[in-house]
Image: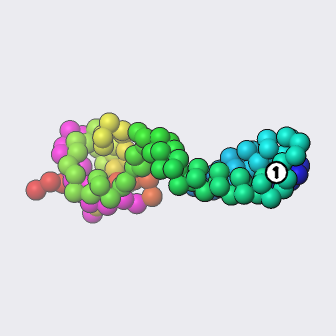
């Protein structure tokens, strides 16, 4: 049974690595405990299966919340939509043919003029959209 539990553990880890959803990792934990039990003489397969199921479910129910919180701590996905209607200062000029740059939350981004109007360096502009990796901006009236 040791080899079976090792296989279950490896398969669970492979699935977890490919999905990163903190779901199948708990089956790997249960398989590890069951594999350790399989090494002890006199502990039958039914006991191992029950322990595997119990440890997997208990780990999932009680530990998943904390693990997800720990690994997502400090991570904030960049949400382009939160930049809409934000006013920023141009660092370099943008016009019909040339992309300019502006600092958006401490990061220099390419800025494209919404209607081809010249956006001067130092001018305050408003972010009105996102096109690929460029913000679309217009002059503030």
Q: Is residue 115 visible?
A: yes
Q: Is residue 92 visible?
A: no
Residue drawn at (89%, 42%) of the image: 41
Residue drawn at (47%, 40%) of the image: 70
Let me know if residue 124 is in the magenta part. Answer: yes
Rendering coords of residue 96 (x, y %) = 33, 56
Rendering coords of residue 67 (x, y %) = 51, 44
Query: Which image quadrant: the C terminus?
Result: bottom left
In the rendered view, does 85 fall on the left or right side of 21? left
Residue drawn at (22%, 42%) of the image: 89
* Residue stretch rendered in magenta on the structure: 115-131
Secondary structure under tag 1 reads: helix
Rendering coords of residue 28 (x, y %) = 71, 49
Rendering coords of residue 10 (x, y %) = 78, 49
Which residue is most to the front? Answer: 42
Let me know if residue 53 is in the magenta part. Answer: no
In the rendered view, does 75 fall on the left or right side of 39? left
Which residue has dot 1 on it?
Answer: 5
């Amino acid at each position: 049974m040791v080899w079976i539990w090792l296989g279950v553990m490896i398969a669970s880890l492979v699935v977890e690595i490919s999905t990163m959803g903190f779901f199948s990792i708990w089956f790997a934990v249960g398989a590890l405990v069951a594999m350790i039990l399989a090494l002890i003489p006199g502990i039958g397969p039914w006991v191992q299966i029950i322990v595997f199921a119990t440890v997997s479910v208990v780990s999932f129910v009680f530990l998943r919340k904390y693990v997800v919180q720990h690994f997502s701590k400090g991570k904030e996905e960049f949400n382009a939509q939160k930049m809409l209607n934000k006013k920023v200062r141009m660092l370099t000029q943008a016009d019909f043919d040339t992309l300019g740059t502006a600092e958006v939350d401490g990061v220099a981004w390419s800025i494209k003029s919404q209607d081809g109007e010249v956006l001067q360096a130092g001018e305050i502009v408003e972010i009105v959209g996102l096109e690929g990796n460029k913000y679309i901006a217009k002059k503030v009236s």
